[in-house]
């Protein structure tokens, strides 16, 4: 197959304070890529293999890591690519409502099993104003006050999902609005499995592409001012520790499994958010391991290789970091499988670097690491 696809990509060159634009070519025959600098009209990266990038990672709005640079795909750059890839992928807005946040892991598993790619995810608390804006179309409905009360009664999980025909596909997986009806008509659907009735119906999905854009903008705005007004992250910074689900585990579709394990083993997730880490941030975050751990640069490269998910884990007593550390298990998954087969790394890890999750090592660093993601990188 000699297909060559091409995409417009941009890279925010922080050091030079400029947004640089390129054309990214993807060669299907061997999965290689090439970058052409559109401003200086010259080759920027010779055709080469770039680990972790496949055709399914290249869609409009995606962020891909190309040799430590986070590049954003902004469009298709030729008719051929547009024709072959343009119609298929659609993004939609999905939200898990407050009463099923504690079962989020199970729902994430279903979402992933059904072929959706989770491209954004954030636990937030809506204010009354957010809920009124979000449900503006229901302004005159008698159930509005109840709905606002429900949606602000606790954190929600906001997500951007991507799939072929994503808007309709997500509505289908959700099932009918009334969960009781859903149990009759669509027993495998999310509302049938996790909802109670027509008000407490587990989750939300945009009903059109236009609605998806509007709703995504409320939760994941691109402008600074709108970001300031968007629903806040829920981190508590109390009795907590930090867990990062690493990019390889996210790519392997393990997000739901890992979140479920955490939720089903006595820990509470009080904040969660997907990040696309930049190299300087990853280096800074892992600074304490520099010169101490042989895998330091491998760890940094792993952390920037794709989307990762940071989690604020809260336990029942003051020993959360050490309890959670024990639950995560030894750094080396091989060792973990021998010594502590029930730990996260024994179950989901592959190598010392691709060991599924990072967790805070020293109890006194728990709060600092949580603050790094949920204060500094906000
Ligand atoms: N008759 C009702 N009584 C109470 N709550 C209702 C009723 N109808 C809808 N709701 C609540 O309002 C939400 C929005 O209603 P809508 O008719 O837009 O349903 P939907 O499109 O299936 O749901 P969503 O917009 O949340 O995906 C519902 O998800 C439900 O939580």
Image: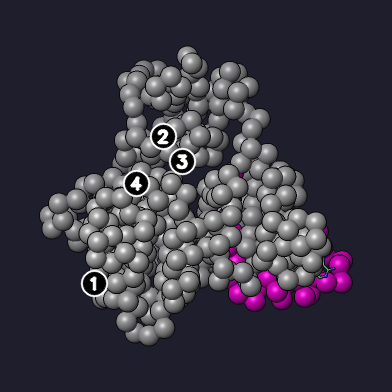
Q: Disc 3 to disc 2, how far (Cα)?
A: 11 Å
| Residue 110 placement: quadrant | bottom right
Which stretch appears magenta? 134-162
Element under label 1? Answer: loop
Q: CA distance from mark 1 to mark 4?
A: 23 Å
Q: Position of residue 233 (x, y in %)?
A: 51, 66
SS category of the residue bearing label 2: loop
Circles 1 and 4: CB distance less than 8 Å?
A: no
Whichever of callouts 1 and 4 sits on the residue coming sooner in the sequence is 4
Q: Residues within 10 Å of mark 3 (few under 14, many from 20)?
A: many
Where residue 24 appears, x then y in whole percent? 44, 26
Q: Distance from label 4 to label 3 (Cα)?
A: 11 Å
In the picture provided, is 123 more to the left or to the right than 166?
A: left
- Report helix, strand or loop for mark 4: loop
* Image coloring type: one colour
Q: Which mark, by number, is residue 63?
A: 3
Position above or below: 34 against 9: above
Which residue appears farthest toward the bottom when viewing the image? 317
Secondary structure at badge 3 equals strand
Q: Are marks 1 and 3 in contact (CB under 8 Å)?
A: no
Disc marking residue 322: none
Residue at position x 50%, y 40% from top?
Answer: 62
Taking depth in this image into account, of 30 and 50 the one nearest to the observer is 30
Is residue 170 depicted above or below 3 in this figure?
below
For disc 1, the marked residue is 362
Q: Earlier in the sequence, mark 2 or mark 4?
A: 2
> Disc 2 marks which residue?
53
According to the picture, the residue beneath numbered tag 4 turns out to be 304
């Amino acid at each position: 197959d000699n297909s060559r696809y091409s995409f417009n990509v941009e890279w925010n060159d922080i050091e030079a304070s400029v947004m640089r634009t390129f054309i990214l070519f993807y060669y299907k025959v061997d999965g290689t890529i090439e970058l052409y600098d559109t401003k200086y009209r010259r080759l920027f990266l010779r055709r080469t293999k770039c680990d972790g990038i496949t055709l399914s990672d290249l869609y409009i709005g995606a962020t891909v890591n190309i040799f430590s640079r986070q590049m954003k795909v902004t469009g298709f750059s030729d008719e051929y690519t547009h024709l072959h890839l343009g119609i298929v992928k659609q993004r939609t807005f999905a939200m898990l409502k407050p009463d099923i946040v504690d079962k989020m892991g199970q729902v994430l598993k279903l979402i992933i099993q059904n072929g959706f790619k989770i491209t954004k995810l954030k636990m937030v608390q809506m204010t009354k104003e957010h809920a009124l804006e979000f449900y503006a179309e229901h302004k005159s409905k008698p159930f509005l006050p109840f709905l606002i009360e429900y949606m602000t009664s606790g954190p929600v999980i906001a997500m951007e999902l991507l799939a072929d025909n994503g808007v309709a596909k997500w509505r289908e997986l959700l099932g009918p609005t009334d969960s009781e009806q859903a149990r009759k008509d669509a027993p495998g659907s999310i509302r049938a499995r996790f909802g109670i009735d027509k008000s407490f119906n587990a989750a939300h999905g945009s009903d059109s592409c236009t609605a998806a854009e509007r709703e995504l903008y409320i939760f994941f705005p691109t402008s600074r001012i709108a970001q300031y007004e968007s629903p806040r992250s829920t981190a508590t910074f109390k009795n907590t520790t930090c867990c990062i689900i690493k990019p390889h585990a996210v790519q392997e579709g393990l997000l739901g499994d890992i979140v479920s394990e955490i939720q089903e083993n006595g820990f509470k997730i009080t904040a969660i958010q997907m990040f696309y880490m930049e190299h300087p941030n990853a280096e800074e975050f892992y600074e304490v391991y520099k010169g101490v751990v042989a895998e330091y640069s491998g760890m940094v490269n792993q952390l920037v290789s794709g989307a990762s998910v940071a989690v604020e884990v809260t336990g029942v007593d003051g020993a959360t970091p050490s309890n959670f550390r024990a639950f995560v298990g030894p750094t080396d998954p091989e060792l973990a499988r021998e010594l502590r087969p029930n730990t996260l790394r024994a179950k989901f890890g592959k190598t010392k670097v691709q060991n599924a999750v990072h967790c805070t090592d020293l109890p006194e660093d728990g709060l600092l690491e949580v603050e790094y993601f949920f204060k500094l990188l906000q």
